[in-house]
Amino acid sequence: KAGVTQTPRYLIKTRGQQVTLSCSPISGHRSVSWYQQTPGQGLQFLFEYFSETQRNKGNFPGRFSGRQFSNSRSEMNVSTLELGDSALYLCASSLGTASYGYTFGSGTRLTVV
Amino acid sequence: DQQVKQNSPSLSVQEGRISILNCDYTNSMFDYFLWYKKYPAEGPTFLISISSIKDKNEDGRFTVFLNKSAKHLSLHIVPSQPGDSAVYFCAASDRLRNTGKLIFGQGTTLQVKP
């Protein structure tokens, strides 16, 4: 079966711009979580959506937002980009909780210049 | 406050020997633990997990041990192969209170020498 698909794979944006990243989960998975990976902070949780509702949120500023559609596909948006937002953004899909496991996509590498 | 710690940034072992990767946690509410393997520019790949009601889980060459009293878990890879060379992350979950959220350690880079 198809895995978790993230688009685009690479993105270069200028400070102050906004960006939208997309994640298509494994078919049947209703939970989508987003993570930011940076060399200094490691993998940090952004937020999780389940059946179009945000169930959990990490400690990131309001510039980071997301949504989930009825087909479980999810998008995350970062507004007013800062240099420090440069990172690998990963999404993970699951049937529900950690017991079912989380399958990660290959990520979107965002570079802010 | 780092709730999940992997204190060894790197580990080097000879092919065929055992690799032991360690992870400590501080939050006693964590009830599920996972290990992931990651190559650069790729997403983490799930390896093995363990529930807090168990102290050992085995899957092929991979075994995870959990010591709840010490808040410590370890991943054993036997025998180690060059293809195991990657960054390994342990992650913890509080399934009841923090759905969808994994807390990751900083990772350990494993190098398996032929």
Image (spheres, coloured by chain):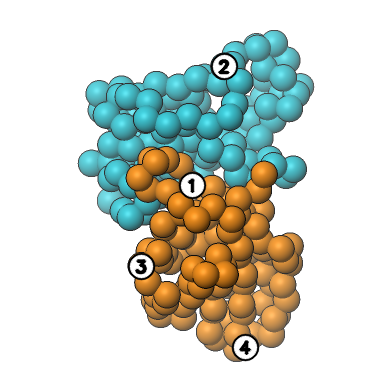
Whether residue A40 sits left or right of residue A30 in the image: it is right
Q: Amino acid at mark 2?
A: Gly
Q: Nearer the viewer, residue A58 or A66?
A: A58
Spatial CA span between label 3 and label 2: 37 Å
- Residue shown at 61% from the left, 20% from the top: A61
Query: In this rendering, which labeled residue sits more in front, label 3 or label 1?
Result: 3
Spatial CA span between label 1 and label 4: 30 Å
- The image quadrant of residue B11 is bottom right
Could you say whether the residue bearing mark 4 is in a helix, strand or loop? loop
Query: In this rendering, which labeled residue sits more in front, label 1 or label 4?
Result: 1
Spatial CA span between label 2 and label 4: 48 Å
- Residue shown at 66% from the left, 53% from the top: B106
Whether residue B58 sits left or right of residue B92 in the image: it is left
Q: Which residue is mark 1?
A: B102
Spot the cyan chain and give its letter: A
Q: How many marks?
A: 4
- The image quadrant of residue B14 is bottom right
Q: Which residue is mark 2?
A: A62
Spot the orange chain and give its letter: B
